[in-house]
Image (cartoon, grey):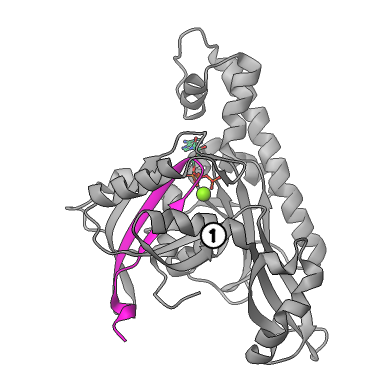
Amino acid sequence: MFASKKDIVGIDVGSSAVKIVCLRESRGAFQLESVGIMPLDPETIVDNTIMDSTAIVDSIQNLLKALKIKSNNVATSVSGHSVIIRKINLPVMTDSELEASIQWEAEQYIPFDISEVNIDFQILSPDPQDPSQMNVMLVAAKKDFVDDHTALFVEAGLNPVVMDIDCFAVENMFNYNYGFVDDEIVALIDLGASATSVSVLRGDSSVFTRDIQTGGNLLSEELQKRLGLSSIDAERAKLGERNIADVDPDAVDEVLSEAIDNLAQEIQRSLDFFAATENDDQISKIYLTGGVSNSIKVKEALEERLGIPAERVDPFRNVKVKDKEFDVEYLNAIGPMFSVATGLAMRKVGDK
Ligand SMILES: Nc1ncnc2c1ncn2[C@@H]1O[C@H](COP(=O)(O)OP(=O)(O)OP(=O)(O)O)[C@@H](O)[C@H]1O
Ligand SMILES: [Mg+2]
């Protein structure tokens, strides 16, 4: 009974950093309790694979200690190619009927052996074209991948009570902060270091998701490859520094704008795929999260390519933030990086 009242800590283990958010809920409104980030060495997580679990466990523990967080209950999430999210069409049935047959129904949609995955689903809506059918969001995640992720928290002495998917956490954060208009279609794009995830929402429900296995790292890699920059200089140049010794600022701008356009093109391809499946539906706005959304050039490139207005998301927009306790300006500057962690912190014990 009291479990749901316990604080839950949202922990997002991204490939570039661990991010933690703690919220306090009172009468349906959230207040920020703590927020923190600890960068990870680029070798720690490579291609979605944990290479150095000790480094991650240490970062989690150090961050919790620095933030003086006592709660052991953690909501966390996974993403990437070991996670499959598909909207499928099935004959109308109840939740419990589907529960009993989901393994069998899901088999044809999942490129892995069914015994190797954890399966979850959500019944979305009846099919408007055929009332005997319904739309279902199917989620399958490779067990060993989820187990490796869970083990990080167990090793850190924590209790992972909610295992979410990155893009659903972002949606959760978004719905709380921005609300939704029935039938309005918006795209949420999480621009991370190694991956970009695209999800399309109609009202408050997810209708399309797609992962692109490239992100902010692409920009620094191009600077390194084409201008011979060190990884440190490439990162500085990417974040906007232009007075780096022996580096031509015009060349940096040129390489960056090409790389950004490539990223925008990949995103456009994903959204074209959505347009092809959903025929007449138009995306009215794009909301950007993740660290790369701090780049105004990325926002402009997307607006130009897609012809849709884009906005950088503030995950604390409707979260009460005491300005005596937090540097509000700093929070605003780094906010989008905390989108996943904030969505996770909004979960409750018992959520799946
Ligand atoms: N102003 C900026 N301009 C361009 N890139 C930026 C800016 N600020 C941060 N970034 C980039 O954002 C990325 C970090 O974002 P984020 O924390 O969302 O990634 P992550 O969650 O660790 O990665 P992933 O989700 O791909 O595993 C880094 O690549 C960083 O260089
Ligand atoms: Mg991320």
Residue that lies at the very extreme toward the top in this rendered image? 246
**What residue is drawn where x is 72% and y is 48%?**
268
Q: Report the front residue among 53 and 268.
A: 53
| Residue 276 x/y as whole percent | 82, 61
Circle 1 residue: 147
What element does badge 1 sit on?
helix
Question: Residue 37, can we see it?
Answer: yes
Q: Report the front residue among 51 and 206.
A: 51
Residue that lies at the very extreme toward the left in this rendered image? 324
Residue 325 appears left or right of 249:
left
Q: In which quarter of the image is residue 95?
A: bottom right
- For disc 1, the neighbor class at 10 Å (few under 14, some 14 to 19, many from 20) is few
Residue 89 appears left or right of 11:
right
**What residue is drawn where x is 67% and y is 29%?**
258
Magenta-tinted stretch: 1-24
**What residue is drawn where x is 35% and y is 61%?**
158
| Residue 309 x/y as whole percent | 60, 52
Relative to 50, say whether 42 is above or below.
Answer: above
Residue 212 appears left or right of 5:
right
Q: In which quarter of the image is residue 304?
A: top right
| Residue 205 x/y as whole percent | 60, 73
Relative to 182, say whether 149 is above or below.
Answer: above
Residue 231 appears left or right of 105:
left
The kind of residue tagged 1 is Asp
